[in-house]
Amino acid sequence: MSEEYRRYANDRLANLRTVRNSWLVHWRELADFILPRRYRWLVMANNMARGSQINGNIIDSTGTLAARTLASGMMNGITSPTRPWFKLRIEGYEEDYDVQGWLSDCERRMMTVFQESNFYQSMAIMYFDLVVFGSACVLIYDNYDNVIHCNNPCLGEFFFDLNNDLEVGTVGREFVLTNSQMVDEFGEEKVSKEVRDAAKEGALKGKERVIGHIVEPNRGEFGLTWNTALETGGILVGDEVTITLDVQAVKA
């Protein structure tokens, strides 16, 4: 990572954090009385009080039970693990039996991946977060053993930013990893010497550090530029900008 991009990432996270601040009070009240373990107002490394009792404000669990019932209904109705809940289709090939057979095979393989991984457990957590807080995030990573592995950041760990279509275009995240976990996740060549050395020390191996993570569109990877026309019409914004001006001028 270049120092220039590191500064950009830090500034980007700081901006996302500032924009999100006004929501923290609302989420804190919802967490206190409904779902206290799924909210973190401050991402802090080496917090030894994480196991402390934090559900003291819940006198009547009706709200939590109601949220659980709604989340269960959404899980069963949208992404039920006991029945097919999606169908792959390519427009114009509905009568092509070879294509339909290939799509059916893809559906079967996808369902197998969902069942073998933690996808459905992650969906259940996501729906619970969504019905309580109105926001939820699921990150899906490649996994050698199960093809995919899903992660559910809790409220307070992640940030959303919208694109010009008012859809989520950027996801930021702050979380903690130990020195040992950082080496396992990123590899020794991608971490600092300080982290590599600490991961080899018994007393420092489990010491945590705050990690910043940003997911943004990277259209330059595909060679797409500002003046690249889309098949559906319009143009796509990229890292490079090409502007052509047809100017007519009259001498004063």
Image: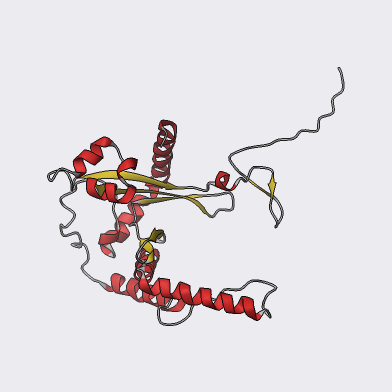
Give whichever of 97, 164 is nearer the camera: 97
* Quarter of the image where one finds residue 207: top left
Extreme residue toward the left, this view: 203
Query: Which of the image's four quarters has the N terminus?
Result: top left
The spot of residue 59 in percent (x, y) is 20, 68
Q: Is residue 203 found left or right of 114 in the rendered image? A: left
Asked whether, in this view, residue 227 is left or right of residue 161, the answer is: right
Number of numbered discs present? Answer: 0
Residue 50 visible to the viewer: yes
Color style of the picture: secondary structure
Which quadrant would the C terminus be assigned to in this image? top right
Q: Is residue 9 left or right of residue 210?
A: right
Percent across and percent down for residue 187 are 32, 46
- Seen at 41% across and 33% down, the residue is 7
Choose top left, top right, bottom left or bottom right for residue 102. bottom right
The image shows residue 213 at horizontal and vertical percentages of 38, 46
Left/right of residue 146 with respect to residue 50 in the rendered view: right
Taking depth in this image into account, of 25 and 183 the one nearest to the observer is 183
Camera-side residue of 195 and 8: 195
On screen, residue 132 above or below 206: below
Q: Is residue 42 visible?
A: no
Q: Position of residue 220 (x, y in %)?
A: 57, 44
Measuring 72% from the left and 54% from the top, which residue is drawn there?
Answer: 233
Q: Is residue 171 above or below residue 60?
A: above
Q: Based on the displayed image, in which of its 4 quarters is residue 74 positioned?
A: bottom left
